[in-house]
Image (tube, rainbow, N blue to C red):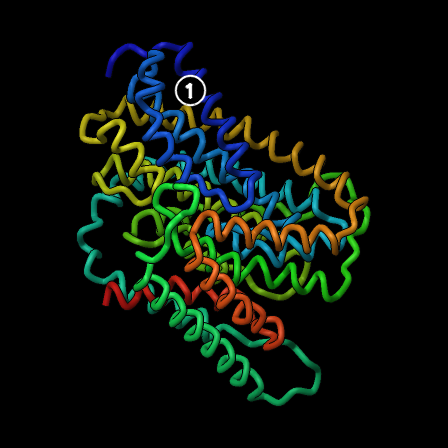
Amino acid sequence: MDDISLYLLVASILIGYLLGLISGLTPGIHTNNFALLLVAASPFFIGYGFGPMYVAVIIISNSITHTFLDIIPSIFLGAPDADTALAVLPGHRLLLQGRAIEAIRLSAIGSFGSVIASMLLLIPLIFLFRGYYLIQGYIGFILLFIVLIMLFSENGERIEGQGSLAHLKFKGYATLIFLLSGILGLLSFEREFLIGSLIGLPNPSVLFPLFSGLFGAPLLIQSILSKTVIPEQMKGAFHLTRYRVLRGIATGTMAGAIVSFLPGVSSAIGTLLSRLFIKDDLTIDSHREFLVSLSGVNTANSIFCLVVLYVIGKSRSGAMIAVNEIYDAAMWDGSVLIVFVTVIFFVSLISYFSTVIAGERASAVLPHINYQIMCIAVLIVITVMVVLFTGWFGLILFLSSVPLGLMPTYAKVRRSHLMGVLMLPLIVMFL
């Protein structure tokens, strides 16, 4: 590795951080889109003296910052991306209880805690990742096992006096929702070639219209129909026991590590995996711990995707595909990884405070806005973005997803079963 210019390194971190602020706070924009745009813009940066390693630092800084900030539009606007889709309902419930600031703080501590935990696990997991090829042929069975646990753990709404077999009804609902969303996913991925951005966005994905329809739009529609009023948001620290905070960080970090290891599996599946370790007792503490875990999954996954690229040369995310294209991982040595990990720590520290501050600013403004009008406006904006980012086929997928996204609420089962949209296609692909 060549001598490092501290000036260029700091400048690269700041550029990536600022881009992460934009992508994280803007609904519908994923860090992978920015990463691919940065690949296209790399000649510009190189022309100003930013070598390949510094462009890679920009992409990594952007990716990490995004995982901190993307919780804000998910909670306040109900506009998730694939990584925060399952946070919409718990985050929204805390928002309606005047606890949005607390939710943001929990998310921030989950992300930063996972950075610390990931660094502590870095060396052991480097050795573990070298055993990737031993399980490569069993990935489909691993995913199927996760799905079976998810479905069998569904007990539905707790009603006093219900029969002892009532849980079977809810398991049936959950299975139906999983299969319907899975079939939608299969049909969507088979026809992904029909997706085309009207504004020239590189590599548009079916995930944006699908997740917006399954998780974002139903929440907005329910808020409009129920005439939801946002209360004044309480200030102060979060209220969650140290044990549950640490457990949320631990489960999120380990789930992020697992999915970074598996090909084709996104952090959205890691969120589902971490959910299995948190008792879904519908209490505030359950929602709090889930937000910690979810944010830990997303941030840890971004870190461990970098480690996987270094150890076995496999790109597990759009950001790492971009990094590898700019700065070939085959050329790295241990010192390069140390630089990248140091960058991650410092950009995470900045992002933690940025997330808390941005959440406090948003929570101060939101109660003074007509929430129904805002939900209608956000629903229109998401629909327009679906068309612009994914074309008319994306709009069809979005509209097809919305009715399915409403089903878990009325069936009284967890919305996580809608993750069949990803899980079933992956299981079919690997079995």
Q: Position of residue 53 (x, y in %)?
A: 30, 21
Q: Position of residue 8 (x, y in %)?
A: 39, 13
> Relative to 310, is 418 above or below?
below
Q: Quadrant of the C terminus?
A: bottom left
Residue at position x 55%, y 88% from top? 165
Residue at position x 22%, y 49% from top? 132
Residue at position x 32%, y 62% from top? 191
Regarding residue 68, the answer to whether it shows in the image is yes
Residue 265 or residue 145, whichever sits in front: 265
The answer to which quarter of the image holds residue 200 is top left
> Relative to 255, is 50 above or below?
above
On screen, residue 113 versus residue 320, left or right, reads right
Q: Identify which amino acid the numbered label 1 is placed on.
A: Ser
On screen, residue 151 versus residue 106, left or right, reads left
Which residue is the site of mark 1?
12
Q: Position of residue 314 (x, y in %)?
A: 23, 42
| Helix, strand or loop for disc 1 | helix
How dense is the environment of label 1, judged by Cα within 10 Å: few (below 14), some, or many (20 and up)?
Answer: many
Residue 241 or residue 142, whichever sits in front: 142
Regarding residue 247, the answer to whether it shows in the image is no
The answer to which quarter of the image holds residue 124 is top left
Residue 292 or residue 374, whichever sits in front: 374
Q: Quadrant of the N terminus?
A: top left
Q: Position of residue 271 (x, y in %)?
A: 47, 55
Residue at position x 32%, y 14% from top? 47
On screen, residue 426 versus residue 284, left or right, reads left
Q: How many marks?
A: 1
